[in-house]
Image (spheres, helix red, strand yellow):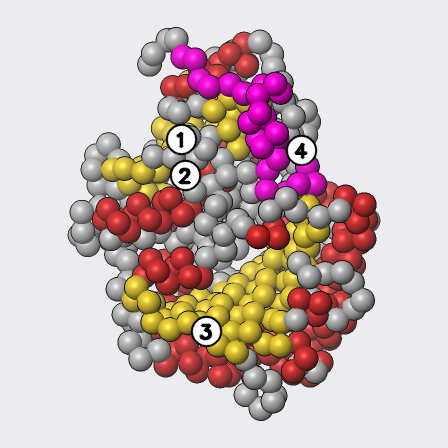
Amino acid sequence: MTAQMTPLTVGPEDPRYIELSHSDNHRFTVEPAQFVLPVTPDETVAALRGAVSDGRGVACRSGGHCGQDFVGTPRRDLVLDLHNLNGVGLSEDGLGVRIGAGATVDQAQKALYRRWNTVLPLGACSAVGMGGLVAGGGYGPLSRRLGLVVDHLRAVEVAVVDESRQVRLVTARADDTGDLGELFWAHTGGGGGNFGIVTAYEFRSPEHLADGPVGLPRASGRLHVQKIMYPWAALDEQAFITLLRRFFEWHERHSAPGTPESSLFATLFVQHRSSGFLQLMVQQDADVDPEGGILREFVASLTEGTGAVGIPRGGVMSWLTGTRYMSQADCGDVMGARSASKSAYHRTTPTDDQFAVLHRHLNSDHPGQASYVMLNSYGGEINRRDPSDTVAAQRDSIAKSSWFSAWQDAGQDGLHLGWLRGLYEEFFAGTGGVPAVGDRTDGCYINYPDADLLDPARNRSGQPWHHLYYKDNYARLRSAKRTWDPLDIFHHRMSIEP
């Protein structure tokens, strides 16, 4: 390792500081003494070593899409921004792919496809950074067919700090045992900012080693894609409830892995009435079903007999074009927005009474053009694994939901936070205001962190926040934390406790 490194630093006097001080959620600002933008893992280690030696508080980020203030609070002296660690290339043994922690989903998807005609089940938000996405488990439109992102993870390269404050770069692999094996496992859903600074991941899928030049799944030749708008004006309360209930019931019937239906993924944006529409985004592998019958039957089943009519767009597209057509980019009104989000895993279909709660809140007199509940397909190949195989323990759900509101004016923080909390807590009133681990729900997703779960007035389930995210895997995570971050250098409001 080169001893002398001088990575790029940006202080308050630099015009780039203003841009760097804002992550995706503008409710929070990140204002360290300086940002460091390393280009190599060695530069990352050098910057971390200097900060630790001087006793300075340090944090890191990749894409900056964490919904909570885990980077800026407590106030840091130095923030490592990893955007420039964005390389995508072959792993050292040539059997898999190495992706830098600062690469975005879009960068990774394009490189995998254009270089090797391969894919990973990455998310639909194209600007999200791989560093946090993978650390939290990671899922996307291909997950029903291919599992979670971490189901393809084979190594993690991470800068760690030992009890004598020495910094070193280690690589933990899936076949490691002992402490290294625990460090690898901790990065299969333990969340970011807990054990060290990830500089790169390696991916390889043993079952796909014979498929091509690298051991990852082949991309499909074509996708059936549809975006369908359902005007609020054409949906009475019963049609609304029926649409949502059938979305869940279809997934309840088709949650098993290995079926043709697992090649379908759908996102239903249940938006506030002031937006004018509900929007369904659905894609299905045309190599599995060339005629698109699975997609057509799914879409038709949602509104049959209700009188509601959707306005469709889309068609058959090549894989990368279809993926980009369905992606959610950082642009438009979400830029510069303040936001809040919550999440839930669903094991069964919610009740009609719960859907009526959702209808009432989304139909209320609320300035909620950017307020919605996002319902995502789950199950399929995700559900093949045991909950302890990876930290991501939710392995028998049928759907995942994200509860979201965005706004521009800081003076409206209380209004929007209150609306979102009221909706979420009333929807899950039967389980203490949160989707408690139980028969119908299975907790929350750490990549959509929600600090309200720390508050016993908001989380009345009797289950601590860490059980909602990690379930029975939390004790093992704490053990890994004590081994690999004994000084608790890497911490935030919802980090793993030593």
Instruction: Name the amino acid, label 3.
Output: Arg
Residue occupied by mark 1: 85
Q: Tell which circle, 3 or 2, labels the residue nearer the N-terminal end.
A: 2
- How many dots with numbers? 4
Above or below: residue 16 compared with residue 125: above
Q: Position of residue 177 (x, y in %)?
A: 36, 33
Residue occupied by mark 3: 313
Give the camera-side residue of 274 and 383: 274
Instruction: Name the amino acid, label 2.
Output: Ala
* Residue 103: assigned label: 2
Q: Main secondary structure of the magenta part?
A: loop
Instruction: Name the amino acid, label 4.
Output: Thr
Q: Magenta residues?
A: 5-28
The answer to whether the residues at label 4 and label 3 have Cβ atoms under 8 Å apart is: no
Q: Quick check: 300 left or right of 367?
A: left
Give how far apart the Cα atoms at labels 3 and 2 are.
31 Å
* Residue 371: assigned label: none
At mark 3, the secondary structure is strand
The answer to whether the residues at label 4 and label 2 have Cβ atoms under 8 Å apart is: no
Give the camera-side residue of 74 and 35: 35
At mark 2, the secondary structure is loop
Residue occupied by mark 4: 29
Give how far apart the Cα atoms at labels 2 and 1 are.
7 Å
Q: Residue at x 62, y 35 (%)?
A: 22
* Residue 430 drawn in magenta: no
Q: Position of residue 182 (x, y in %)?
A: 44, 34
